[in-house]
Each structure stands twice: as structure tokens, then as C-alpha cells.
């Protein structure tokens, strides 16, 4: 997960003067702890206030945060939107390169995710080792914990018969297609049939496409199919659920949230932020929310406009959220030489 090289610096500005806030509902004291030293709009006193250990009156309320998500500064995040951690992370010496706070945030997040995954890995591996894959399956796929990669990087067509779809109780709410028989077709070759000893689901983005591709649904053969390649477009092709896999399921959900289009394309940024907080807290990851906000701000794209537009209170918020991989691509011309 360390390839998430999110490039975000702190700007020299004290206050970017943004007209927009990021709303957050303070569900518990833990929320306050993770927002310590951050600025919010005190609606009663009509000025900015800072969150500290005495701010318990905010619990159970929605507050308007100054946040990197809605920061209007062009060259990184301003001090007011970043909060008191700015004083720690801002490099004052002009001869020193600025700290990459995007990288700091992703390191804090992904290191803990990796640690938590490793702690469950042993248990998972023991269970995975008991799964009896066919020789045919192992010839074509690599299995890593609970994800499956295709070995061949050529374009291929993934075909799943409607009759092979399984109604699985545990994944129904996720709208995933669950199956254990499928076919892979390379070019004009005859499709190769695979039977998995465990129920599989596709990568969320492939699943989304499979679900949406009604056009490709062939009513005569009753098969779903999608043409894709086995390269880095997707991290993995399939994944599967292992019992007592609760923690890694949450970690995977965090990864999915920022690395795939599954949730981010249908929900406003406040909801993506809210979901990210919930997943992180459920997974027991200890991280100040500022780091999550820096990651999310990197994923926001104001459709060609610069962040300056956020200074205009009449601006009709218009943005799209790109997953981290797409964002790295979109922002690649801004990656600094440091
Ligand atoms: Zn700002």
C-alpha cells in the first residue's frame, strides 16, 4: 500500500479565506481527540474557535470544520485549515524542502493498516492453506491471502453465467456478484473453465462494471461478461471471504474506499469523509483526522477550476472525487522534484 505517494504540502498562507467548511458530526469524545487543535466555526459567537480537551459541548453536534478538503489555498494547505499541527510540520527554513504532509498522512494510515493486516495474516493464511485449489486454478492464478491475481497479463474476457451466481447472505448488501464457477477467454481461444473451492467476488470496480454492463448481458446464453486485462489496472481480480475475517474486511473496506470508485462516485465528499472515519475507528487505527482530510482533499477535483473558487461564497460547489490512483495520474504534473 506504500505506493500512495500523495503529494501535498503546507502553504505559506495563514488563512486562505475559504468560504466553505467541511461539516462533521461529533459522535464521541474520540472524535474530539482526533480533531484536537483544529479550527471550527463557532456559530453562537460567530468566529473561528479551536478544538481542545474542553470542547466536550460539541459532542452530539454537527460542526463546521476548516479543513484541507475545503481549503482555498493554491499552494498546499493553509495554517487555519490544517490546524495546530501546522506549527510542527511547517518547515520555516526556505532552503529546506517543505514536508510532504500528504505522504505523512498516508504513511500513518497505511502503516497501521499493514500492521493490522499482518496480525491477521497468520490466522488467515492458516485457513487459506486448507483451501484445496485445483491444479488448473493454480496454473493461472496467484493467491495472496484473500485476493487472487491472474498470472497472464494479456487482455481477457471474464465470463460468469447467470446460473452460477450465488445469493450469499453476508455480501448481499454490498451488491456483489458472488460465484465459484467462471470462464476466462483469451482472444479467440476457447474459454477456460475454472471452479473455485470457495465463493469468489470480483474487484469492486470490475463488479461495478459487471453490474452496470446490462448491455453486454447476453439473454440467450444468460452470461455476464467483461473484457479486461490482468495488469495493474486492478490490484487483484477476485477476492474471497474467510470466516472471522472481520478486521481485514474493515481494512480492505478502507483500501476500497480510497482506491476504487465503488463509494466515492455516488456520494458527496462529506459522506466519504464520514465513512472513512467510521472505518478507521472500527479498525482501531489511531490517526488524527487531519491526515484523512489531506488524503481526501487530494482526491477532490474541481473540474478544471483551481481551489481559488472556494473563496467565492456564491460558488456552486462542483467537484468530482477520483480514487487515489486516478488522482496521482491527474496530479502527476504537480509532483515536485524534492
Ligand atoms: Zn485554507
Image (spheres, rainbow, N blue to C red):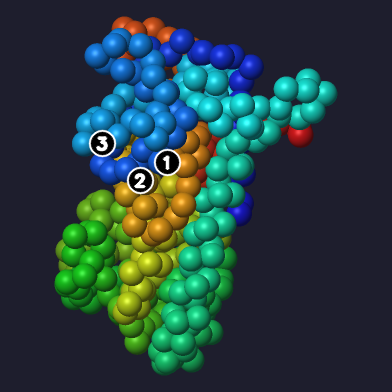
Residue 36 higher or lower than 128, as above or below = above
Q: Which residue is mark 2?
A: 30
x 55%, y 20%: residue: 78
x 45%, y 71%: residue: 147
Query: Which quarter of the figure has residue 193?
Result: bottom left
Residue 251, position as x, y percentages in the image: 42, 60
Task: Depth check: give the residue in front, 90 or 132.
Answer: 90
Residue 151, position as x, y percentages in the image: 56, 73
Query: Disc count in the image?
Result: 3
Residue 133, position as x, y percentages in the image: 43, 89
Find the distance from the CA under tag 1 to the CA under tag 2: 6 Å
> In the rendered image, is residue 277 in sight?
yes
Callout 2 crowding tier (Cα within 10 Å): few <14, some 14–19, many ≥20: few
Sequence-wise first label, 1 or 3: 1
Q: Secondary structure at mark 2?
A: helix
Residue 321 higher or lower than 76, as above or below = below
Q: Which residue is mark 3?
A: 59
x 36%, y 53%: residue: 281
Residue 67, position as x, y percentages in the image: 43, 26
**Is mark 1 in CB contact (under 8 Å) with mark 2?**
yes
Sequence-wise first label, 3 or 2: 2
Task: Depth check: give the residue in front, 305 or 16.
Answer: 16
x 68%, y 33%: residue: 99
Query: Which quarter of the figure has residue 204?
Result: bottom left
**Is mark 3 in CB contact (under 8 Å) with mark 2?**
no
Q: Which residue is mark 1?
A: 34
Residue 196 higher or lower than 111, as above or below = below
Task: Depth check: give the residue in front, 31 or 136.
Answer: 31
Whether the residue under disc 1 has CB within 8 Å of ligand 1: no
Residue 26 in the figure: left or right of residue 8: left
Callout 3 crowding tier (Cα within 10 Å): few <14, some 14–19, many ≥20: some
Q: Secondary structure at mark 1?
A: helix
Amino acid at each position: 500500500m506504500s505506493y500512495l505517494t500523495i503529494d501535498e504540502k503546507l502553504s505559506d498562507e495563514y488563512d486562505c479565506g475559504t468560504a466553505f467548511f467541511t461539516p462533521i458530526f461529533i459522535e464521541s469524545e474520540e472524535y474530539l481527540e482526533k480533531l484536537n487543535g483544529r479550527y471550527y466555526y463557532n456559530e453562537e459567537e460567530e468566529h473561528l474557535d479551536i478544538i481542545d480537551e474542553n470542547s466536550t459541548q460539541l459532542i452530539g453536534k454537527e460542526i463546521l470544520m476548516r479543513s484541507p478538503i475545503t481549503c482555498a489555498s493554491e499552494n498546499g494547505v493553509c495554517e487555519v485549515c490544517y490546524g495546530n499541527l501546522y506549527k510542527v510540520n511547517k518547515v520555516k527554513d526556505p532552503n529546506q524542502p517543505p514536508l510532504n504532509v500528504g505522504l505523512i498522512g498516508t504513511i500513518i494510515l497505511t502503516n497501521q493498516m499493514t500492521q493490522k493486516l499482518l496480525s491477521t495474516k497468520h490466522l488467515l493464511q492458516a485457513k487459506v492453506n486448507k483451501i484445496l485449489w485445483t491444479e488448473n486454478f493454480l496454473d493461472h492464478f496467484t493467491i495472496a491471502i484473500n485476493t487472487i491475481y491472474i498470472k497472464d497479463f494479456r487482455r481477457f474476457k471474464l465470463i460468469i453465467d447467470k446460473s452460477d451466481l450465488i445469493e450469499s447472505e453476508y455480501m448481499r448488501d454490498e451488491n456483489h456478484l458472488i460465484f465459484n464457477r467462471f470462464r476466462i477467454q483469451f482472444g479467440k481461444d476457447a474459454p477456460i473453465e475454472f471452479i473455485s473451492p470457495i465463493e469468489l467476488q470480483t474487484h469492486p470496480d470490475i463488479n461495478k462494471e459487471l453490474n452496470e454492463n446490462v448491455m453486454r448481458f447476453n439473454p440467450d446464453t444468460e452470461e455476464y461478461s467483461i473484457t479486461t486485462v490482468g495488469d495493474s489496472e486492478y490490484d487483484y481480480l477476485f477476492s474471497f471471504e474467510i470466516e472471522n475475517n472481520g478486521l481485514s474486511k474493515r481494512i480492505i473496506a478502507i483500501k476500497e474506499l480510497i482506491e476504487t470508485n465503488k463509494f466515492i462516485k455516488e456520494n458527496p465528499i462529506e459522506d466519504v469523509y464520514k465513512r472513512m472515519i467510521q472505518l478507521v475507528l472500527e479498525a482501531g487505527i489511531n490517526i488524527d483526522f487531519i491526515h484523512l482530510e489531506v488524503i481526501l482533499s487530494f482526491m477532490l477535483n474541481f473540474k478544471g477550476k483551481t481551489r481559488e473558487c472556494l473563496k467565492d461564497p456564491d460558488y456552486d460547489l462542483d467537484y468530482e472525487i477520483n480514487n487515489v490512483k486516478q488522482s496521482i495520474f491527474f496530479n502527476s504534473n504537480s509532483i515536485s522534484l524534492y
